[in-house]
Amino acid sequence: MAEKICRLQPDCFVDTRDMPVFTKMAELWQEVDGLICVMAAGIVVRGLAPLCQDKKKDPCVLVLDEKGRFVISLLSGHLGGGNRLATELAWKIGGQAVITTGSDVTGHTALDLWAERNGLVVENRKKMTEMSAKLVNEGRLHLFTDYENDSLPEDFQRVSTPDSADIVVSDRDYPNCSALFLRPCALTVGLGCNRGTGKEDFETAVHELCQDEGLARDAICGFASIDLKNDEQGLLDFVSGEGLALQFYGKKELNAVQGVSTSAAVLAATGAKGVAEPAAILAAETDLGPGQLIVRKRKWKDVTAAVAMKQIRLSV
């Protein structure tokens, strides 16, 4: 059966090493996207119990009987792709896929997959589980968003205020709202600075900017500046710590951006009429169109920062 699966399924191999099965599972756990186990489900459960950590990271696990009658999606059915793989594999070998995740059984939207398709960051995993259960049990969720949408799943009902929503899709902070927050990776922060500015100064500026403007830090997808700052160690260290992209633009690119604040001092020092605002706008450009400046530049002692927003459209 394992050899048959490998003939039918691309990027698949049979592990024939002579070692205890639990040891084999542990070694493969961090190396593969999925495990297809042709054995009793009980063996698999006992072997995987000490390995399972997070459904965002764990590989998917399928369990098959020796005849291939049943293909069970046991672990990471949604984000790990186990349900999809089980359905595909069952069709290829003439078996029956066994899917037990609630949304798939009831036909409702899988919240985690919908968030992933739309590039949304889950702010609270526990709340995600609660809302997934509510959708299965009640059949509908109320959603508030300040973004455009081409269409929404049929079991989502759009509402006009965050307080009446089960799910909020926004880059804004609503501190008294108890809904599930899904953050679009939509904000880009343009940064300018004096030479020798420390990492802590950038952290202070970005923190205060988000706090004062009511922006969610999780919605920031990247930072940008002028190429003259590509060796600015404090800037590099700060962005590296954030784990986000940092883009640099030349003065010609920055000067081509219209509708931004200008500075004679910046122009004299860099040849660019501005840095923070045009850099943020350029970094927020997507296939949907140019970025929109939502926070004009603010100045700290050694840092200047501005925020632009990507165009976002939600879909089914």
Image (cartoon, helix red, strand yellow):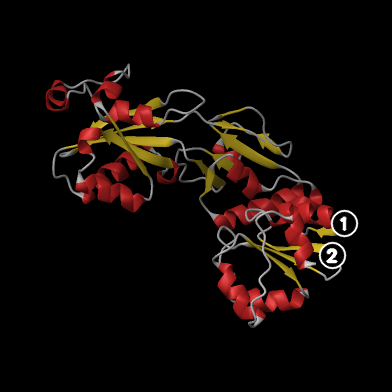
Which element carries disc 2, helix, strand or loop?
Answer: loop
Q: Secondary structure at mark 1?
A: loop
Quadrant position of residue 18: bottom right
| Residue 130 found in image quarter | bottom right
Crowding around mark 2 (Cα neighbors within 10 Å: few <14, some 14 to 19, many 20+) is some
Residue 214 in the image: above or below residue 259: below
Q: Few, some or many C-alpha atoms within 10 Å of disc 1 (few <14, some 14-19, many ≥20)? A: few
Q: Which part of the image, by quadrant, shows the C terminus?
A: top right
N-term-proximal mark, 1 vs 2: 2
Q: Which mark is residue 68?
A: 2
Q: Position of residue 175 (x, y in %)?
A: 45, 45
Rendering coords of residue 155 (x, y %)? 73, 39
Quadrant holding the N terminus = bottom right
Q: In front: 37, or 105?
A: 37
The amino acid type, in three-letter code, at marker 1 is Gly
**Three-letter amino acid code at the position of disc 2:** Gly
Mark 2 and mark 1 in contact (Cβ < 8 Å)? yes
Viewed as shown, does residue 33 lie left or right of 257? right
Residue at the disc numbered 1: 94
Say whether residue 191 is left or right of residue 58.
left
The x and y percentages for residue 97 are: 82, 58
Name which residue lies at 69% across and 48% down: 110
